[in-house]
Image (tube, grey):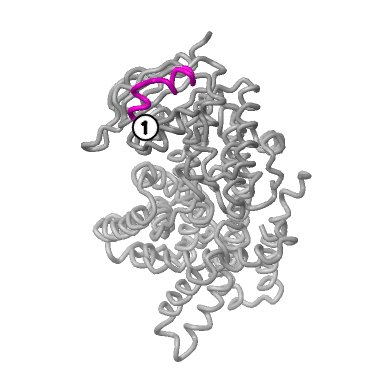
Amino acid sequence: MKNWQKHTGLILPILALVGMVLWPTISGSVAARESIFTILKAIALASSLNILLGYTGYVSFGHIVYYGFGGYIGFFLLTAQGWPLWSAMLAGGVSSALLAFLLGKAILRLRGAYFALATIGVNEAMRNLVTKLDFIGGPTGLTLNFKTYLAYGGAAKALEMSFYVLALIVLAAILLSHFVRISKFGLGLLAIRENEDAAEVMGVNAPDAKTWAYVLSAIIPGIVGVLFFFKNGNVEPNDAFPLHSSIELLVMVMLGGQGTVLGPILGAFAYQGMRGFLVTNAFFKDIQLSVSGAILLMIVLFFPSGAIGWLRQRLPALRRILA
Amino acid sequence: MTILLSVQGITKRFGGLQALTRITFDLPEGQILGLIGPNGAGKTTLFNAINGVFPPEEGRIIFRGKDVTRAKTYDMAHMGLARTHQIVRPLNELTVRENVMVGACFGREKHGLDKAGKIADDVLEFIGLNRGDQLAGSLNIAQKKRLEMARALAAQPYLLLLDEVLAGLNPSEVDGMIQTVLNIRKRGITIIMIEHLMKAVMGISDRIIVLDYGTQIAEGTPEEIVNHPKVIEAYLGDPRLAQKLMEGEE
């Protein structure tokens, strides 16, 4: 394979990202920017989860814990310690990675459903712990001093800047996802997904590979958490560790197509688009999570490889592009 | 004559079941060792003990001069041990070529992806499986068995454990596979093969070990084995098998 051909899978993801950034930039619509912000955040989280779920084949029901944990730590440094946003974001990513490393060593020995159950426990335990810790505000959480925004040119400027920073994070998430997928490390992960015992017999150090996949899938959620709570102005336990968001992330990845770079992007876009419609619809607004559940059920039953997987099976000629 | 693998009195229990009892043998480099015995005799368990899937409770395993009794499965692969499985384990959603590349990337030589791709192409050619771009899950059973061998070979191992590679193949496929095994040996790879097909295992093994209820009841050249009273006795539970064994054919 020629060198550039390895990277054709990046074309659509990058085009999609550029399109999403240009739309509110050109139209100047703040409402559009806010909608896209939500979608970009979902893409960053779903692409990260995909490294674990799609490449390695491990279902994490509590992946949002890395968003909440990194977010909390970064936000604490930002408000209580006066760190600049960039260092706080970095600290959030590193803390989440560290937590994933320690947890990975402990719970990645579990396989299948047992691992999935353990991840739920981790999320719930973390939310409870944070609720009991007074120095980070306990159940009421932390609030940003409005003056903090001054350093970034005022609140309006800070919010606008957050959008473009998020776009850069999404770019990083896409590149990470792509380069993991085409790497030797990624091949080892795929082997684990297909048959962990066979992979080990062939020499894949599964415990290490799984731990690193878990760490890689935790970094970007940690960074996104800090940025989101910075933009939001406050953080509290129920916003940081919402179990249902973990499940929504699973739906996005499965909907778009697990194990592909484009899948989680498409899935996050489609899911957030649908959610936007449902929560504004009089009939659906209270039952939108039930709809998500029903969708997950349909995907698992009828399209286990998701939209992109389905297209790849039917259009082999486009496999290079739909990577 | 260098000893590649030395199995020294290994014992393995599963709860109350004595799966292996003090198995001992030395395997010189370049030989084909046949491992036979009735179903449930402990042949696959012995493979699992050697490659670290179920480490034995007692005894030692020395591979290329190193004690590997407690080594992990993937460490054994890095040291130059490869195996196939009786029940094939293809990586279904990966292509045949990618399956073989896993062997080359993570086996003894740990190649990068580009080199691994070239090795995969060579090995697939050698093994006669020209379906590199097909998904592994779409192969038939004979092709999947070849894929198992190709993956193992791509690791460029010193020792290859073959677990019933002939089972479920039709006669012409069996002949092809036997030729492949002999060709692998020509490449200088030492082989232990578990096989029920007596004609095949008698025909190509340099030495044979017979297991029965986890104990080693005989060891020797194929000629010594077919005339060994204990072996005949073990197989007499199945007169048809004993007959086959004595006639030395399928």
- Give the x, y percent position of residue B95: 64, 49
Q: Main secondary structure of the magenta part?
A: helix
In the rendered image, residue B222 lying in the magenta stretch gets the answer yes
Q: Amino acid at mark 1?
A: Tyr
Q: Residue at x 53, y 31 (%)?
A: B199
Q: Residue at x 62, y 40 (%)?
A: B100
The correct choice, above or below, for B38 with respect to A7 in the image is above
Q: Residue at x 42, y 55 (%)?
A: A66
The correct choice, above or below, for B241 with respect to A299 in the image is above
- Give the x, y percent position of residue B184: 62, 27
Q: Chain of mark 1?
A: B
In the picture provided, is A251 more to the left or to the right than B41? Answer: right
Of residue B127 and residue A314, the one placed in the foreground of this image is B127
Q: Residue at x 47, y 60 (%)?
A: A148
* Quarter of the rendering containing residue A11: bottom right
Of residue A92 and residue A269, the one placed in the foreground of this image is A269
In the rendered image, residue B27 lying in the magenta stretch gets the answer no
In the picture provided, is B234 more to the left or to the right than B175? Answer: left
Instruction: Point out the stretch of residues depicted in magenta.
Output: B221-234
- Give the x, y percent position of residue A61: 39, 60
* Quarter of the rendering containing residue B7: top left
Q: Which residue is outermost to the top?
A: B1
- Give the x, y percent position of residue B175: 63, 36
Instruction: Provide the residue designation for mark 1.
Output: B235
